[in-house]
Image (cartoon, rainbow, N blue to C red):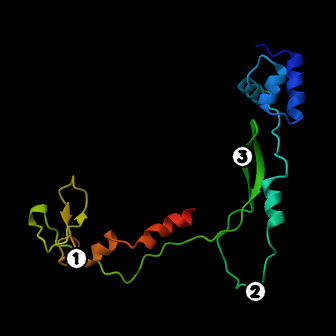
């Protein structure tokens, strides 16, 4: 398939009218949708926005007015807008997308945790009443087990049991925060 000057001009005209690559390929005849997309990219034709405005304008129009009844808080914020490339039709459009300020979470470990002093037992030294929590890399010489006293019904001491057995709601909390 040869791209003649008149076919390229027809492609540019149809593209500017907002036709999809499939529709343009059908009108040109003898060319695939992917060939049209490739030619559009080689010609550096501008992308087209979807009907209904951009994401930034829709978000600002729907945002409620700020209320002053909340106490003033300071948060680490991101820049108000940054360029984001998103696919639209057969091209990628670069547009300014506004992000709302978010709170930066700082991890603070609990300060009242008492770590047990490990007895550093080898595998052959473990009994039913010793903690079987592994410490270190099993491929190194300093690998050992905690060895502290454990309750009758647990393979771990009280400290390591808290690490091993977490309530269901605490296990699900981080995944809910990601969504």
Query: Where does residue 86 sit, x and y in percent of width and height?
Result: 71, 46
Residue at image location 53% in from the left, 72% down from the top: 106
Reading the chain from its start, which is encountered first: label 1 or label 3? 3
Q: Secondary structure at mark 2?
A: loop
Q: From this viewpoint, which residue is outermost toward the left?
A: 124
Pair 3/2: label in front:
2
Residue at 79%, 77% (x, y): give it.
66
Taking 18 as reference, is 31 left or right?
Answer: left
How crowded is the residue under tag 1: few (<14 C-alpha within 10 Å), some, or many (20+)? few
Q: Which residue is mark 2?
A: 69
Q: Which residue is mark 3?
A: 85
Q: Is disc 2 in contact with disc 1, using a CB cutoff of under 8 Å?
A: no
Residue beneath the point at 88% across and 34% down: 16
Could you say where residue 62 lies in the image, as x and y percent from the top left?
Answer: 81, 66
Residue tagged 1: 117
* Labels 1 and 3 touching (C-beta < 8 A): no
Q: Position of residue 127 (x, y in %)?
A: 11, 70
Q: Residue at horizontal 89%, vertical 23%?
A: 9
Q: In the picture shown, does residue 73 fall above or below 131? A: below
The 10 Å Cα crowd at callout 3, few under 14, some 14 to 19, many 20 or more, is few
**Image quadrant where residue 162 sits:** bottom left
């Amino acid at each position: 398939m040869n791209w003649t000057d008149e076919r390229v001009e027809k492609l540019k005209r149809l593209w500017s009218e907002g036709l999809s690559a499939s529709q343009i390929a059908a009108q040109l005849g003898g060319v695939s949708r992917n060939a049209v997309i490739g030619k559009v990219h080689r010609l550096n034709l501008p992308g087209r926005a979807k009907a209904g405005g951009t994401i930034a304008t829709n978000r600002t129009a729907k945002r409620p007015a700020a209320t002053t009844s909340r106490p003033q808080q300071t948060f680490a914020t991101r820049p108000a807008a940054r360029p984001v490339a998103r696919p639209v039709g057969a091209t990628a459009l670069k547009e300014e997308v506004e992000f709302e300020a978010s709170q930066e979470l700082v991890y603070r470990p609990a300060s009242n945790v008492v770590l047990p002093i490990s007895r550093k037992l080898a595998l052959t030294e473990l009994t039913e009443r010793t903690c079987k929590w592994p410490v270190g890399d099993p491929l190194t010489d300093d690998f050992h087990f905690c060895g502290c006293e454990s309750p009758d019904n647990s393979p771990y001491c009280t400290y390591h049991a808290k690490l091993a057995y977490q309530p269901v709601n605490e296990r699900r909390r981080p995944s809910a925060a990601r969504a």
